[in-house]
C-alpha cells in the first residue's frame, strides 16, 4: 500500500515538472532518519503530500510543516534545524525563481546511486579542522554536530546559533476531532495517545494522622517520646495533621448500540484510567451491568479489550440505564462508593427502560457519591440538545454534564478531576429516592 502511494506521488511530482523535488524530499527524509529522527515511511509520505497543500513559495511554511510531521519531542528541534539549514541551504527568492526547491542538490545518494560524486554539505568546523576524507565521514560529522546541537553543546570557534521557531504538532488535529470521524490510521494513533495519558485525582483527608512540620495539631505522643533522650525535657514540640489519600473513582460506561461509534475509544480511555490511578472500579452496561475491573487491569490494551468483549454479552444491544444503575446500587455501591468516591457515567442518554427507575436510582447514586459526573459524547455536537426522556430525567441529579467526544474534552475532564474538593463542589439538592 505504501509503495502504491509513493508511485502516485512520484507521478504527481513528475507530471507537474518537479521530479527533482520528489527525489530531494526523499533524500531529506533519509538524512533525518540517519540522524536518529523517526522519519519512517508514513511520515515521509506525509511530508511529500504536505507540499501539495502549502505550495512552493514559502520556506517558513515548508519548515513548519516538516517539523510538525517529523518531530516527536521538543528536544529533537535543534537537530532538525541543523539538517534543514544544511540540506536546503539554497533558497531563491520568488523573483529569482518561482520554485524555491530548484537549486537543492542531491546531497545524499539514493539506493543504486552510492557511487555518486556529489558531496554532502560541510558542517560548521574550525578553520584548522581537516576536511573529511570521504562522503561517509562527512555524514558522520553531520550526525555528530547535530547530536551536539541537540544536547546544547557548541564547538570552540563556532558562533552559529540555531534559530528556534514556533511550530504546531500534527497531532493537534486529533485533539478536537470527533472520535466517530477517526480514520483507521487515526484510531491506531489514538490508541497510542490514550496510553500516554496521565491522570491524577484530587486528594481527600483521611481519619488517620501523620507527622507534619507545619501541622495544625499538637502531637503529644511524639513530643514525649522524642524528649526521652533529653531526660524527659521537651526540647521541641511536634505537630501532626490528617493524611491525604486519593479519592476512589467509579466508571460506568454505556456499550449499547447507540454508543457503538464511541465505545472502543472510551474503553481505551477507561483502560488508561484503570492503569493510571490507584483506586478505580469499572463497569459497562447495555441491558445489564457487567464489572470489568479485573479485565482492564491487564497492561496490554488489546488483550484487555478482547477479554472484555468475551465477558460482555449485551454489547451493541439495547439500553436500560435505570435497571443497570439499580443493579449497581444494590450489589456494588456499598463496596466501591466509600471514602468520597467520584462516579462518572458515560452514556448518550438513550434509554428503553423505566424513566421512574432511572430517576430513583440516579437520586440514590448522587447521595452516595462525592461527585456525580455524566459524560455524553453527543454533547460535542453544535446542535445537540438533551431532549430524550432518559437524559432529562438524569440531569436533575448530575453535578457535571460534560462532553466526551474528543481528546480535548478528556483533557478538560482530567483538569476537573485533579481539582475536586469541597470548596468547588457544586451546590446540590438532596432528593428522596421515593417520590
Image (spheres, rainbow, N blue to C red):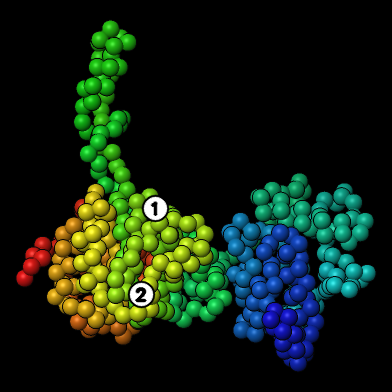
Side of 186 relative to 327 (left or right): right
Label 1: element kind = loop
Compared with residue 3, is residue 161 higher up or lower down, i.e. above or below? above
Rendering coords of residue 287 (x, y %) = 29, 75
State which quadrant residue 350 falls in.
bottom left
Tell me which residue sits at (27%, 22%) in the image. 222
- Local packing at callout 2 (Cα closer than 10 Å; few below 14, some 14-19, many 20+) is some
Residue corresponding to mark 1 = 277
Q: Which mark is residue 314?
A: 2
Question: Which circle, 2 or 1, is nearer the viewer?
Answer: 2
Disc 2 to disc 1: CB gap under 8 Å = no
Residue in view at x 53 percent, y 80 percent = 183
Q: x, y (%) of residue 3?
A: 73, 80
Query: As displayed, is residue 392 above or below residue 241?
Result: below
Q: CA distance from mark 2 to mark 1?
A: 27 Å
Earlier along the polypeptide chain: callout 2 or callout 1?
A: 1
- Tell me the quarter of the image containing the C terminus: bottom left
Q: Is residue 128 left or right of residue 278?
A: right
Question: Which quadrant: the N terminus?
Answer: bottom right
Mark 2, secondary structure of its residue: loop
Amino acid at each position: 500500500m505504501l509503495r502504491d502511494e509513493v508511485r502516485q506521488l512520484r507521478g504527481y511530482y513528475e507530471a507537474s515538472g518537479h521530479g527533482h523535488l520528489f527525489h530531494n524530499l526523499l533524500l531529506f527524509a533519509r538524512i533525518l532518519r540517519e540522524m536518529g529522527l523517526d522519519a519512517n515511511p508514513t511520515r515521509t509520505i506525509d511530508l511529500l503530500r504536505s507540499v501539495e497543500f502549502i505550495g512552493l513559495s514559502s520556506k517558513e511554511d515548508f519548515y513548519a510543516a516538516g517539523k510538525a510531521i517529523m518531530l516527536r519531542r521538543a528536544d529533537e528541534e535543534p537537530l532538525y534545524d541543523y539538517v534543514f539549514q544544511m540540506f536546503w541551504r539554497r533558497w531563491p527568492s520568488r523573483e529569482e525563481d518561482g520554485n524555491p526547491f530548484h537549486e537543492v542538490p542531491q546531497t545524499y545518494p539514493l539506493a543504486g546511486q552510492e557511487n555518486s560524486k556529489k558531496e554532502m554539505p560541510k558542517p560548521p568546523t574550525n578553520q584548522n579542522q581537516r576536511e573529511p576524507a570521504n562522503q561517509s565521514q562527512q555524514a558522520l560529522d553531520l550526525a555528530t554536530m547535530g547530536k551536539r546541537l541537540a544536547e546544547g553543546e557548541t564547538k570552540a570557534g563556532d558562533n552559529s546559533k540555531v534559530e528556534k521557531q514556533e511550530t504546531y504538532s500534527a497531532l493537534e488535529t486529533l485533539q478536537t476531532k470527533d472520535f466517530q470521524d477517526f480514520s483507521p490510521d487515526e484510531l491506531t494513533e489514538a490508541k497510542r495517545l490514550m496510553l500516554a495519558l496521565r491522570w491524577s485525582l484530587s486528594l481527600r483527608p483521611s481519619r488517620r494522622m501523620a507527622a507534619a512540620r507545619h501541622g495544625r495539631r499538637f502531637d503529644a505522643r511524639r513530643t514525649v517520646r522524642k524528649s526521652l533522650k533529653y531526660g524527659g525535657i521537651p526540647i521541641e514540640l511536634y505537630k501532626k495533621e490528617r493524611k491525604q489519600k486519593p479519592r476512589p473513582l467509579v466508571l460506568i460506561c454505556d456499550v449499547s448500540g447507540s454508543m457503538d461509534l464511541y465505545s472502543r475509544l472510551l474503553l481505551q480511555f477507561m483502560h488508561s484510567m484503570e492503569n493510571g490511578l490507584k483506586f478505580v472500579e469499572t463497569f459497562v452496561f447495555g441491558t445489564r451491568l457487567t464489572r470489568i475491573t479485573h479485565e482492564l487491569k491487564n497492561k496490554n490494551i488489546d488483550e484487555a479489550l478482547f477479554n472484555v468483549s468475551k465477558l460482555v454479552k449485551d454489547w451493541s444491544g439495547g439500553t436500560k440505564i435505570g435497571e443497570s444503575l439499580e443493579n449497581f446500587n444494590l450489589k456494588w455501591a456499598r463496596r466501591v462508593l466509600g471514602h468520597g468516591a467520584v462516579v462518572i457515567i458515560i452514556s448518550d442518554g438513550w434509554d428503553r427502560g423505566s424513566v421512574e427507575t432511572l430517576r430513583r436510582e440516579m437520586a440514590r447514586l448522587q447521595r452516595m457519591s462525592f461527585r456525580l459526573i455524566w459524560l455524553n459524547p453527543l454533547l460535542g455536537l453544535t446542535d445537540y440538545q438533551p431532549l430524550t426522556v432518559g437524559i432529562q430525567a438524569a440531569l436533575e441529579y448530575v453535578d457535571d454534564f460534560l462532553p466526551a467526544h474528543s481528546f480535548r474534552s478528556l483533557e478538560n475532564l482530567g483538569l476537573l478531576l485533579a481539582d475536586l474538593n469541597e470548596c468547588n463542589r457544586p451546590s446540590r439538592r438532596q432528593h428522596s429516592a421515593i417520590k
